Image (spheres, coloured by chain):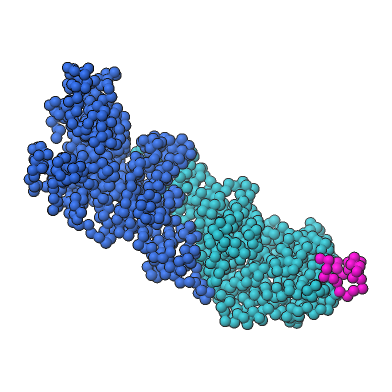
Chain colours: A cyan, B blue
Amino acid sequence: MNEKKVQGKIKIDVEPIGKRISLEKPTNGLKAIVGAGIGIKTVCGGQGVCGKCRIIIMDKNINPPNSREEKMLSKSEIDNGVRLSCQQVFDRDMKIYIPASSLSEEQKLQVKGVEKELEVDPPVKKYHLKLKRSTLEKPESDLGQIKRVLESEYNIFIKDIDFEVLKMMPDVIRKNSWDVTVAVRDGEIINIEGGDSTERSYGIAVDLGTTKIAIFLMDLNNGKTMDSKGVMNPQISFGEDVMSRINFAMQDPESLDKIQSVVVEGIREGIKKLCSKNSIKTSEILEMAVVGNTAMHHLLLGFPVRHLGLSPFVTLAEDPLSVKAREVKIDTAPGAYIYIPPPIAGFVGSDHLAMILSTGIDSMKGNYLGVDIGTNTEIALAGNGTITSVSTASGPAFEGAQIRYGMRAAPGAIERVIIDEDTFVPTVQTINDKPAAGICGSGILDSVAELLRTGLINERGKFNRDSKYLCRDDKDEYQFILAHPGDDNGSEVLDKKEPDQKGEKKGSDKLSCDDGVITITQKDVVEIQLAKGAIRTGIDILLENADINFKDIDGIIIAGAFGSYIDPRNVMNIGMFPMVGLDKISQVGNAAGVGSRMVLLSNGQRRKAESIAKKTKYLELTVFPSFTDHFVTAMQLPKPKEII
Amino acid sequence: MNEKKVQGKIKIDVEPIGKRISLEKPTNGLKAIVGAGIGIKTVCGGQGVCGKCRIIIMDKNINPPNSREEKMLSKSEIDNGVRLSCQQVFDRDMKIYIPASSLSEEQKLQVKGVEKELEVDPPVKKYHLKLKRSTLEKPESDLGQIKRVLESEYNIFIKDIDFEVLKMMPDVIRKNSWDVTVAVRDGEIINIEGGDSTERSYGIAVDLGTTKIAIFLMDLNNGKTMDSKGVMNPQISFGEDVMSRINFAMQDPESLDKIQSVVVEGIREGIKKLCSKNSIKTSEILEMAVVGNTAMHHLLLGFPVRHLGLSPFVTLAEDPLSVKAREVKIDTAPGAYIYIPPPIAGFVGSDHLAMILSTGIDSMKGNYLGVDIGTNTEIALAGNGTITSVSTASGPAFEGAQIRYGMRAAPGAIERVIIDEDTFVPTVQTINDKPAAGICGSGILDSVAELLRTGLINERGKFNRDSKYLCRDDKDEYQFILAHPGDDNGSEVLDKKEPDQKGEKKGSDKLSCDDGVITITQKDVVEIQLAKGAIRTGIDILLENADINFKDIDGIIIAGAFGSYIDPRNVMNIGMFPMVGLDKISQVGNAAGVGSRMVLLSNGQRRKAESIAKKTKYLELTVFPSFTDHFVTAMQLPKPKEII
C-alpha cells in the first residue's frame, strides 16, 4: 500500500497491506521520516470535477459519497469503496489504495517509496573541540591533542585519520584559533572544519538503477530527506540493459573507464546541483550510501565485469564495501566514504537487499514475497525467519523493449488499457494525456490482461480473431489495434473516428494494420507470456522450495518504480502472480531508495542489512530440478473463469 | 664500536663498546643480518707499506707488531695498541677501534651502520592459494573464496582489501587459472599476483636525511639487505638546512607541493634503480619503512610545516603512520603502505627513535648516551629503564656552513688535522687525497682540538698569537693557516713551501692571509664553541635532570655518518663530550638506517619502537631552569691539562 501525505499536519505511514496505517504525527528528535510519500493527482485543483484522483478506501467504516463523488463515480465504484481523494478528510487511521492512474506525472518520475521511521545513528558523527595552543613547556602534537580531547570529552577513541585530513589539520586549527569540529567514522577522523559545524552534517543516498539514478540529500543530524533528484543513468548511451553494458565494459580497460566515468559524472553532477540548491558545500557531505544491482555496483567502482557476464555470474565480493569517495572521484568531505551494502549473490544486488530491509519482510510474521520487477526480476520469499531470493531473467519487455510499439514511460505512452467486453472497443490512457505515441510496460500488461478477459486471446495467448480491431500485417501476424497516433487520450476514439476519417475502411469489419496504428501483436503477447512466465516460475519455485502453497502467502510487495504503475489486478489476471487476492498486494514504490537512506542514516540498519544479506539464501533457478516444468506451466495464461 | 667484516668467513658483530664483539658466523634461516659493515682502507692492497689501515686493538692479549708494523708505526702508537689492519689475522673475539681515516672513501659515503640480528616477522606476508572455479550450483564470489581459503588453510582473517587490488582480482584469478598469491598486511589484502610468488617478497627501508637519503632493498623472506643506494636529498636546492626548507615550503601550497615532489621523485628513482639492478619490479615492493627527522617526514608526506618552524615546534602527529604509497605517488605493489615510526616530540624525529632502537641503549644495563650530531643534535640518555631525549640547535658548523673555508665532506675537504706542538706545523689529510679545497666538519673539529692542545688558543677560544701560521686578514681577524689550495695532502707542505714559493714572505715570521690560503679563523673557533657548547649543554642538562655524574656514564654512542668520521678523542678534547674515556665512546655509523630496516622487517621491532617512543620523555632544553648557566660553561674549552 502506498503512503500518502494528504494534509500538512497528517502523515500516513504506509506499510505493506495487512499492517495498520498510522496517522500519527511525525515524531521529532532522533526519529527520522524517510521518503516523501506519493501524492495524488488533483488536476482540477481539488474541485471534484475531473475525477482523476480516484482512491479506494479499504476501511469498513467508509463515509458515504458526497454529491460530487456521486456525479463522478459509477455505482459499482462507489460500492467498491472508490472515492475522490480531493473530497476526503483523513482524520483517523485508515487503509487506502492509490491506483497509479491517480499519481501525477512528476510523481511517477520521482517515486520515492514508503516512509519509514528509524533511529538516526549515522556512521559519521561530528564533535566540536576547543583546543589549547601548544606550549614549549607542554608541547603536544595537533593530532595528539585532538585524540586526547575526543577521548576525555566524548569518550571517542581514534584509531585512524584520513591522510588528506591530516594534511589539512595544522592550518585549519591555526586559522580558526584552535576552535574546530572533527568528523569521526568508525574511529577514523575523516574531516576537520573551523568553528562549531556540528549542526551541518550531510549525507547522500543513491539508488543506482540501470535506467534511473535517484539521489537523496540527507540531514545526518535529524534523518530528514532535505531534497532529492532523479537523473537518467548516462551509461544508457552504452546500452539500455545490463548485459549490453557489461559487453561494452568487457571490450578493454578504456571502455570500463569510460562507462565508469560517465556514471560517476552523473552522480557527481546530481550531488553538486542538490548541494548548491540547498546551500551546502559538497565538502560537507560526510558519507554516501549507494545501492544497486551488482553490475551497476561494479561499473560504479570500476571493477571488471567479465565474470558477471559469464556463468556462474558471481559478484566480485559479497562483503559490504566502504570505499573512499575520492577513489571514485566523487566530491565530498576529504575523507568521506561510500558505503555499499553487500549484494546477495551473483545478480542479486544491494538494491534487492535494500528492498528487503525497507519493506521489513524479513521480520514480518507470515510468508511474504518481495518482488522487484525489471529486466532481471528479483524475488525474495521471507517466512519463518528465513529468506530465499531468486533472480529471473524476465527480459526488457516491461521496459517496452522487444514490443513492436513499445516505449519507455514517457509522455504519450499508453499506460492503461480497458477493452469493452461486448464491443471490444479499446479505451486507452496515455501518460500526461499526450497523444498516443506507443505503449509502456503497464499498458502492455493491461492489454494482455484485457485481451484475455474479453476472450480475444485464449489461455495459450493465441488471438481468437473475432474483432474488427484485429488486423493482420504483411507478415500475416495478427494484431489488436489500440490507437492511431495522434488520437486523443482516454476516449473510444477509434470507434468514433473510423467511419469518418478512415474513409477507405467504411463498411469494413476490420481496421487496417497500416497507417501507423499502435497495436499489440501476437509476438508482443508471447513476449509478455515469457516475461510473466519467468517471474511466476521464480515465485512457484520459491514456494515449492519452501514447501508452501500460494494460499499461505500473507502478502506480496511490489517494489520499484515500474511496479508502482502496474495494475495489481491485472498482474494476477495474466498469471504473473498467483491469485492471492487484491488486498494482499501492495506497491511500495522505490523501496531500494528508502533502503539506501536507511543504511546511510543508521549503523543499526547497516548491521541489519548485512545480517539479512548473510542469512538470505540464494536459489539458482536454472539448476532447480523442476525449472522447465514450472516454466512451461507459467507461460500459460489463466482460464477466463479464474480472472477477477 | 664499528663493525668490520675482515675475512669472508668471519663476521664481527659490532656492539657499542662495553659489549663483547662476536665473531660467530652469521646464522641463517629467519635470522637477519642488517647492514653491511664498514670496510678498512688498504690502499696498498694489504702489503703493509702505506700505513693507512691503522686500527687500535683494545684487547689485552695483543700480538706484538710485525716488522712491517714496526716500520710504519711510531713507538707510542705501538704501545697504545695501534696496528695495521692488513697485517692482522682475526681468529678470536676481540674489540677493535677503527679510526675514520682508515675507511675508504666509498665507505665514507655509504656508511651502513652496525649489523643487527633480529627475528624476521614482516608486516606483509604472502600466501599461495589454489582456488576453484565457481559454479552455478555453488556460486562464490572471488573475494569470498579467497577469504575462506585464507581462513581454512592459513588461519588468516581478512578485514579489508585494498580498492585497487579488488579491481585487479577477477582478471588476475582468471588469467592464472585460479592459482594466485595474495599479500596480506594486518588483515588487509594489499596485492594479488598469478601463480606462486611467495619467494618474492620485497621491501624498501629509507633513512631520509636532510642531506642524504639512504635506500635499502630488503628481502622480506630472509631479512637480507639485497642492495642499497645513497642519493642526495634533492630538496637541497631549496635550502641546505631544515629551517630554510621549512621557510620555502611555508610560502604557499605550490612550494610545499614542489618540495614534496622532488624528494618523492628522488626516492622513487632510487627505488626504481635498485629494483631494476636486482631484477625486481617495483610492483613487488610490499612495504616501505621511512625514518627521518620530523621536518623530512612532514615534507615527504606533504604535511604543512609552518607549525614546525615556529615555537613550540610540535610535530603534526606523535603516532606511527601507515600511509598508502600511492597517496605519496611512490610506485610499489598496488596496496602497499609506507610505515613511518612515531617521532618523539617536536624536532626529535623517527631517525632518533630508530637510532635508540638499533643501538639498543634502551635495554642496556647502565647509563648510555646516544648522540646524533647534525644541525640539530638529538641526544638520548637511557638508564634504569627510562629514556630522556633532548634536541639541541647545534647549528650547521659541522656541515661546513658558517665556517669561512667550510665545505661538505667531498673530495679535497680537509678531514684530519694534526699540529706539531713544538713547531706548530699543521699536517692535514684530505678526502680521497685530493688537493685541499676547504675544511669539512671533522677537520674543523680536529683543528680546534689541535689549536687548543698546542696552546695556540686558550680555554675561551682566543688565539694566543705566537705562531707564524697565524695571519690577520683585512678585518684584523686572526686566522690559522692550514693549507694553500692545491697543496699535497698529508705532508708538512706549508713549512717546506714557504721559503721557496712565497718569495715575498722570505724572512718573515708570519705567513700571509692572502693568496687563497685555507684557514681556521677566530670566528670559526667561536662557531665550533657554540656548536659543541649546545651539544654539551644537552648532555649536561640530561645528566643533571637524571641526577647522575658523567663518571656514571657507561657508554656514549655516536650515530650518523658525520659522527663516524670525527675523532672521538678530539670530541672529548674540545669538551663536546665529558671526559668519559676513549673506551666508552663508540661510533656506530648510520644507526637510523639500521633502525629503518629493523622496523621494515619485524612487527615486533615496530611495537618495540612505538613503545620506546611512548616511554621516551622529551625534555625541552630552552625552558630548563639552568639552561643559560650550562650553556655559558659549555662554551668554554677544556684546560690544557685535561686534554688527553
**Residue at left offset 64%, top offset 79%:** A631
Query: From this viewpoint, is residue A370 visible?
Result: no
In the rendered structure, which segment of residues is drawn in magenta? A493-516
**Quarter placement of the C terminus of chain A:** bottom right
Horizontal and vertical percent position of residue A27: 61, 58
The one nearer the camera, B41 or A432, is B41
The one nearer the camera, B42 or B229, is B42
Horizontal and vertical percent position of residue A363: 56, 70
**Residue at left offset 14%, top offset 51%:** B90
The one nearer the camera, B413 or A383, is B413
Q: In this view, does A513 lie to the left or right of B195?
A: right
The one nearer the camera, A462 or B319, is A462
Query: From this viewpoint, is residue B488 visible?
Result: yes
Q: How many marks?
A: 0
**Residue at left offset 27%, top offset 39%:** B562
Is residue A512 on the magenta stretch?
A: yes
**Quarter placement of the N terminus of chain A:** bottom right
Horizontal and vertical percent position of residue A568: 71, 71
Q: In this view, does A204 lie to the left or right of B240?
A: right
**A524 shown above or below B344:** below
Picture quadrant where residue A43 is located: bottom right
**Residue at left offset 57%, top offset 67%:** A309
Horizontal and vertical percent position of residue A635: 68, 78
Q: In this view, does B120 lie to the left or right of A369?
A: left
Picture quadrant where residue B246 is located: top left
Is residue B206 on the magenta stretch?
A: no
